[in-house]
Amino acid sequence: MPQRKPSEESRSRERTPLRTAVLAALLQHEEGYGYDMTSRINRTRPEWGEITRNRVYATLEEFEADGLVWSDYRKGPGKRGRERRVYWPTPRAEELRSAWIGECPSLEEMRSDIRTWVAFARPRDAPEVLRKLEEYELGCLEMLESLEEPGSEPRGWEDRAINVLRYGTAEELNAELRWITRARREVKEFLAQ
């Protein structure tokens, strides 16, 4: 398994929703090629819009430069199968995944991450998914409690705009809490099998 030495630039690269999704998609199947990963990401995260293969391949190339994946060419299926570049995670990829899951990102980052981790979780990840759901639930509950009820009748446009934003945020958080309850039930039912 040839591995490149991580570049200095890799230390400055931040975690993004796309990087998280590409890493999770690759680790889910323990090998893959960009076209397949792009399809799976687009299927599981439709709210992001259409992610292009070019963006996924660019991310895989960054990962390879960072020593998170290695790649080689493999002949495709059929008589005239053309060669495809296949990627495999290195042990550093799993270490990075564990580090990312262990971080306490902002609630907004956690909202995106938790869906990605659930979408690409392996069966052995179920207990970890439950733990992250609990963390996310606590974050949602804390934010919901922090939303102040207006103390008086709105006086002008700004007061009304703030009330509308508070109401919208509360509705989003309540929807997230319902989703967490459903997701937790599904994971627990799986573990009970």
Image: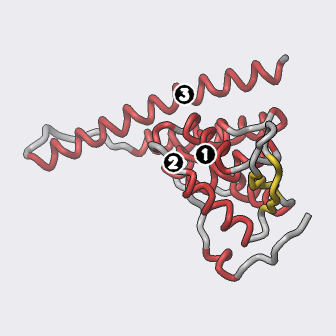
Q: Are marks 3 and 1 in contact (CB under 8 Å)?
A: no
Q: Are marks 2 and 1 in contact (CB under 8 Å)?
A: yes
Residue at label 1? 38
Name the image quarter holding residue 148.
top left
Q: Amino acid at mark 2?
A: Ile
| Residue at x 55%, y 40% (from the top left corner) | 42
Crowding at dot 1, Cα within 10 Å, few <14 / some 14-19 / many 20+, comes out as many
Name the image quarter holding residue 180.
top right
Residue at label 3? 179
Q: Position of residue 185 (x, y in %)?
A: 67, 21
Kindly give the residue lying farthest to the front in the view shown: 80
Q: Amino acid at mark 3?
A: Trp
169 to the left or right of 191: left
**4 or 94, which is in the foreground?**
4
Q: Amino acid at mark 1?
A: Thr
Vertical order, 40 against 2 (above or below): above
Query: Which of the two marks, 3 or 2, is nearer to us in this view?
Result: 2
Q: Quadrant of the N terminus?
A: bottom right
| Residue at x 79%, y 36% (from the top left corner) | 78
Label 3: state its secondary structure: helix
Crowding at dot 2, Cα within 10 Å, few <14 / some 14-19 / many 20+, comes out as some
169 to the left or right of 35: left
| Residue at x 14%, y 50% (from the top left corner) | 158
